[in-house]
Image: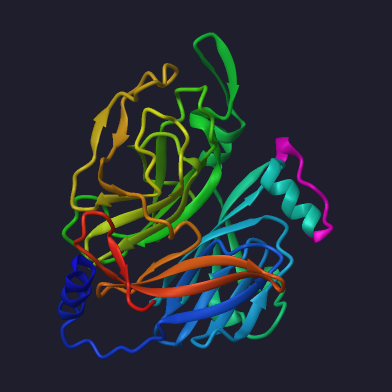
Amino acid sequence: MRRLVTILCAVLALGSCTCRYPDVIHVNGGKFHVQGIALDKDEESMYFSFTSAFYKTDLKGNITGSVTGINGHLGALTFNPETRKAYASLEMKDDEIGRNIADGLGAARHEDSMSRFYIAEIAVDSVDGFDVPFEKAMTLHPVTEAARDYLAEVEVDGSALKHRYGCSGVDGITLGPEFGSASEEASHLYLAYGIYSDTLRRDNDYNILLCYSLEDLSTPQHKYFIYTGNTRYGVQNLAYDPYTERMYMAVYKGKKSQFENYRLFAVDMRQNPYIGRLKGVPYQEDEVEQVDVCGGWHFKWGSTGLCPLGDGRYYISENSKTDEGHVCDAVMYMSSDDPESPFVRISE
């Protein structure tokens, strides 16, 4: 009964919206699984990152353009309809993930000391055919802040540990307003750190967001710490939703028993950041900018794609693998007030 009431309330909340999109957009991605999705309303297209490839599709799931053979981890996606640019995180590194990608492509592995991270700015209108050259479609903006933390060694309880804060690179990405701002303009880009899973260290219980002005992607304006407990590889998908004024963080479930280990968190964008000391991070003596979560859920999906439409609807990736390769079903959901789940599937 609760599910029926939730669906009815969500439908009424949409008011007179007549924008009709498919309940499911099915795309076969190939040898690697989907990492992120984004909707282009003006062109009636969807964009998908499948780890080593960027795909443009129509709303029936037919691939109409691609950038392939990316020897790195192309992660979450977000799209700016004003500039017609998509943004994705991109990692090129020599850990388990980086080695698996290079080996799967038959490409050279990256040296650990040369590990590097980027914001990939994608001119989607340049993806006008198949296997478009990387250089034609993408501009890379180095994320030196994450590289420094990834390559750093720190001391905790007398032990030398690699990767400050447990940083494994970058992944989740979204456009949104500043924290505490009444503006709905998506004037900033937020990029989330990846965080290694490790139940034996205590300095890796924060998820971290870098905040950039869209006018300058060279240097972050803010570095926000969010106390969630350790999550496996950090924020996989990050999505600001103007309908709820929340930023959603989809993660892989953590393993530390002292935490609830949610798969999805929400951060209220109306809150004002505060300055404070970090818990369990002895080498971070200075106070830092922090924001708090406003909710958490054991929601199964979202880590491989979370795309708010801005009117209470969402495309959420439900990934799977078949004999033909990895598959993404971008499935339509609606916002929900059910305390057990923030989203409800429109169709079964």
Q: Quadrant of residue 2?
A: bottom left
- Residue 258 versus residue 106: which sits nearer the camera? 258
In the rendered image, the vertical position of residue 193 relative to residue 307, given as above or below: above
Q: Is 109 colored magenta in this rendering?
A: yes
Give how far across and how far down residue 289 sits, in percent. Answer: 30, 35
**Residue range (magenta):** 105-114
Q: Quadrant of residue 120?
A: bottom right
Residue sticking out furthest to the front: 1
- Residue 105 versus residue 261: which sits nearer the camera? 261
221 on left or right of 154: left
Residue sticking out furthest to the top: 158
Q: So how many labels did they put on this image?
A: 0
In the rendered image, the vertical position of residue 242 relative to residue 192, given as above or below: below
Considering the whole magenta stretch, tell me its main secondary structure: loop
Q: Residue at x 46, y 77 (%)?
A: 84
Looking at the rendering, in which quadrant would you find the N terminus?
A: bottom left
Q: Is 38 colored magenta in this rendering?
A: no
- Residue 196 versus residue 167: which sits nearer the camera? 196
Looking at the rendering, in which quadrant would you find the C terminus?
A: bottom left
Give how far across and how far down residue 311 sits, in percent. Answer: 25, 75
The answer, for residue 278, to whether it is visible in the render is yes
Q: Residue at x 60, y 80 (%)?
A: 126
In the rendered image, the vertical position of residue 212 relative to residue 277, given as above or below: below
Q: Residue at x 41, y 29 (%)?
A: 257
The colour mode here is: rainbow
Give how far across and how far down residue 83 sits, in percent. Answer: 43, 75
In the rendered image, the vertical position of residue 230 relative to residue 308, given as above or below: above
The answer, for residue 93, to whether it is visible in the render is no
Give how far across and how far down residue 194 sits, in percent. Answer: 51, 43
